[in-house]
Image (cartoon, rainbow, N blue to C red):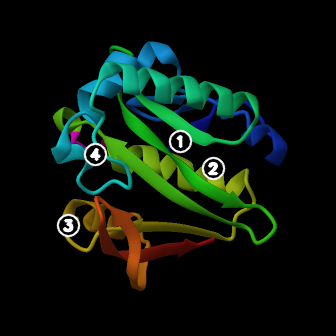
Amino acid sequence: MAKVMNTHTTTDIKNVPAIETERLILRQLNVEDADDMYEYASNSRVTRYMAWDAHLSIEQTIFYLLTVEEAYKKRELLDWAVTLKSNKKMIGTCGFTFWNEMHQYTELGYVISHKFQRQGYATECSRALLKLAFTKMDCHRVEAVCFPENTASIKLLEKLNMQKEGLLRSRLLKNGTHHNLYMYALLR
């Protein structure tokens, strides 16, 4: 079960509060995460089902993290570093790709390093963010999309009790090809 470490108003959520779960600490990303992030973000097995391509250099990862730090300052990003409590290693990210406060919905996204997949970490961090969305962000609906070929993500979304609502045809353009995505959602 997730525990929000401080009490937050809806506006304070945009400050990306630290969240503690049984095995993880979810916190803001920073440039010191570059080596850990590059370790998985440069792996095409990890990024094949992401909207973004594998990082080609550590400099690309550093540039991305500097961009993230600026987005945090502007309160434009709701993305967390997924770190192990045991050794503070950053093993992925989990967050909301967008948040529509007026219509009370958000979209959940996650990526976990290949070395730490299939150990329940994506489920654990996603459950924490679902709780945050429904209790602190006043969301009525949380969505998630995934490639139809991404069976691991489909199993995760179903484990989170998200319902498959349909196929979004040619929703994502990646590497010059339009890809279909499944839409999943969970209502409060």
Q: Nearer the viewer, residue 17 or 48?
A: 48
Q: Residues within 10 Å of mark 3 (few under 14, many from 20)?
A: few
User: Closer to the camera: disc 4 or disc 3?
Assistant: 3
Q: Residues within 10 Å of mark 4 (few under 14, many from 20)?
A: few
Dot 1 falls on a residue whose secondary structure is: loop
- Distance, label 2 to label 3, CA atoms, is 26 Å
Q: Is tag 3's residue or tag 1's residue first in the polypeptide sequence?
A: 1
Q: Is tag 2's residue or tag 1's residue first in the polypeptide sequence?
A: 1
> Which quarter of the figure is the C terminus placed in?
bottom right
Dot 2 falls on a residue whose secondary structure is: helix
Whole-percent x, y for residue 40 in the image: 26, 33
Seen in the picture, residue 12 relative to 163 is either above or below; the reply is above
Seen in the picture, residue 128 relative to 3 is either above or below; the reply is below
- Give the residue number, with chain letter if any, for mark 4: 120
Amino acid type, label 3? Thr
Q: Is residue 107 left or right of residue 58?
A: right
Q: Residue at x 48, y 24 (%)?
A: 63
Tag 3–tag 1 contact (CB < 8 Å): no
Dot 3 falls on a residue whose secondary structure is: helix
Q: Residue at x 37, y 66 (%)?
A: 173
Q: Is residue 122 left or right of residue 108?
A: left
Q: Which residues are magenta?
A: 117-121
- Give the residue number, with chain letter if any, for mark 2: 132
Dot 4 falls on a residue whose secondary structure is: loop
User: Closer to the camera: disc 3 or disc 1?
Assistant: 3
- Give the residue number, with chain letter if any, for mark 3: 151
- Distance, label 2 to label 1, CA atoms, is 8 Å
- Give the residue number, with chain letter if any, for mark 1: 2
Amino acid type, label 4? Gly
